[in-house]
Image: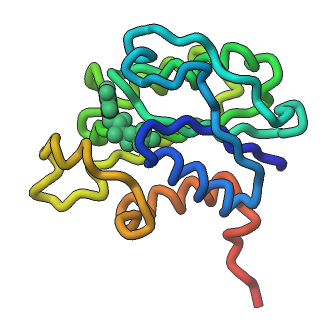
Amino acid sequence: MKSLVLYYSGTGSSRYLAERMARELQCDIEAIRPRWDVPFLMMSGLHLGNKELRTDIDHYDRIVLCGPVWMGQFIAPLKSFVKKYRNHIRELVFVTSCGSSDEKKDEKFGYEQVFKQVRTLLNEKCKHCVAFPIPLVLPEDKKNDSELLMKTRLNDANFKGEILERWEGLMRELNPNQHLQPTF
Ligand SMILES: Cc1cc2nc3c(=O)[nH]c(=O)nc-3n(C[C@H](O)[C@H](O)[C@H](O)COP(=O)(O)O)c2cc1C
C-alpha cells in the first residue's frame, strides 16, 4: 500500500509524528502550507486556503494526515485539504498531537471532538484516528500542569513508554508485514 504523509504543525510535535511516520512507512511526506500561516488568525476563522500541494495525491492509496488540535477543532489547513481532495482520497489515517489527555478526550476541547469531525467529512474512508496526547510524555505529578503542557514538544527523548506503545500499535495496523514475527 503506497502511503503519503501530509502534515501541518504549529510548534513541531505533529511534524515529529509525521516525519517518524514517513521514516517508518518509508513513504513520501509533504507539509501542508496555508496561504497565510498565522495560527492565531486561522483559529479565529480567517483561513485563505492552502498553497498547491507539490505531490499528486492520486498516486497514493493512503493519506496519513497529521496535525494538532486547536480549540477542540479540526484545524483549518487540514480541513481545507480534506474538503478539497475528499473525492481523491482513497483511505485516510488521522494522527494528532494534542494537549487533551485521554481522560478529557470527550470534553469540549478533547480530541474526540476532532475525530468526529474527520469521520463526518470522510465516512468510511477514514480508517483510523489516533491521538498522541502530550500528557503521556509528562511525569505523573505534572500531567495537569498547563504551562508545561503547552511548552512540551514530542521528540526522540520523550517518545517512550505509553506513547511509544500506542505508536507501535498504530504501526502494526499500518504496516503489518513489517511487524510479523519470524517463524522457524
Ligand atoms: C492556541 C492553542 C490552542 C490549543 N487548543 C487545544 C485544544 O483545544 N485541545 C487540545 O487537546 N490541545 C490544544 N492545544 C495543544 C496542542 O494541540 C498541542 O500543543 C499540540 O501538540 C501542538 O502540536 P504542534 O506542535 O504540531 O503544533 C492547543 C494549543 C494551542 C497553541
Count of number-bearing discs = 0
Left or right: 83 as drawn, with respect to 102:
right
Residue visible at 46% across and 56% down? 166
Quarter containing ligand 1? Answer: top left
User: At which x and y percent is residue 104?
Assistant: 25, 33
User: At which x and y percent is residue 176?
Assistant: 71, 61
Rendered image quadrant of residue 136: bottom left
Left or right: 15 as drawn, with respect to 113:
right
Q: Nearer the viewer, residue 111 or 155?
A: 155
- Does residue 122 appear in the picture of this structure? no
Up-down relation of residue 21 to residue 44 (above or below):
below
Q: Quadrant of the C terminus?
A: bottom right
Residue visible at 48% across and 22% down? 75
Up-down relation of residue 20 to residue 119 (above or below):
below
User: At which x and y percent is residue 18?
Assistant: 58, 49
Residue visible at 56% across and 39% down? 66
Q: Nearer the viewer, residue 104 or 182?
A: 104
